[in-house]
Structures are given as structure tokens and as C-alpha cells.
Amino acid sequence: MNDSDEASRRRSVVAEYRKKLLQHKELDSRVRA
């Protein structure tokens, strides 16, 4: 296991997390609107 593998995996995890957050914010704004 080298550093680049760890870094790329962390980046993909963060990307997934951001995607979920954005979807949640969109749903939230739709519900409140």
C-alpha cells in the first residue's frame, strides 16, 4: 500500500460524501420551498 493509493481513495470517499451532501441540500430546499 503506497501513499498515492491512500490519497486517491480518500479523495473518492470525499467526493462521494460531497455528492450525498449536495443531494440532501437540494431535497431539503425543495421540501421547504
Image: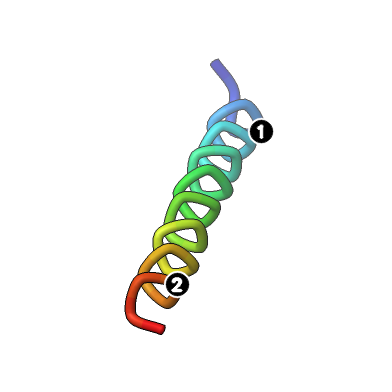
Query: Where is 1 relative to 6, above or below?
Result: above
- The amino acid beneath tag 1 is Ser
Could you tell me how far apart the alpha carbons at marks 2 and 1 are, in whole angstroms? Answer: 39 Å
Query: Residue at 59% across / 45% down in the picture?
Result: 11
Q: Where, by quadrant of the figure, is residue 2 drawn?
A: top right
20 horizontally vs 9: left or right? left
Q: Residues within 10 Å of mark 2 (few under 14, many from 20)?
A: few
Residue 25 vertical placement versus 5 (above, below): below
Name the residue at 45% across, 72% down: 30
Placement of the N terminus among the 4 image quadrants: top right
**Could you classify mark 1 by the number of other residues whose Cα lies within 10 Å: few (under 14), some (14-19), or many (20 or more)?**
few
Instruction: From the top left corner, tell me how far across and down residue 9 is, in percent.
Output: 56, 32
- Relative to 33, 12 lies left or right: right
Q: Is residue 16 above or below residue 1?
A: below
Residue 7 vertical placement versus 15 (above, below): above
Question: Can you give x and y, in whole percent of width and height, for residue 28 in the image?
Answer: 36, 70
Q: Residue under circle 2? A: 30
Is 19 in front, or is 1?
19
Q: Determine whether, in the image, residue 25 is placed left or right of residue 4.
A: left
Q: Residue at x 41, y 84 (%)?
A: 33
**Amino acid, disc 2:** Arg
The dot on residue 4 is 1
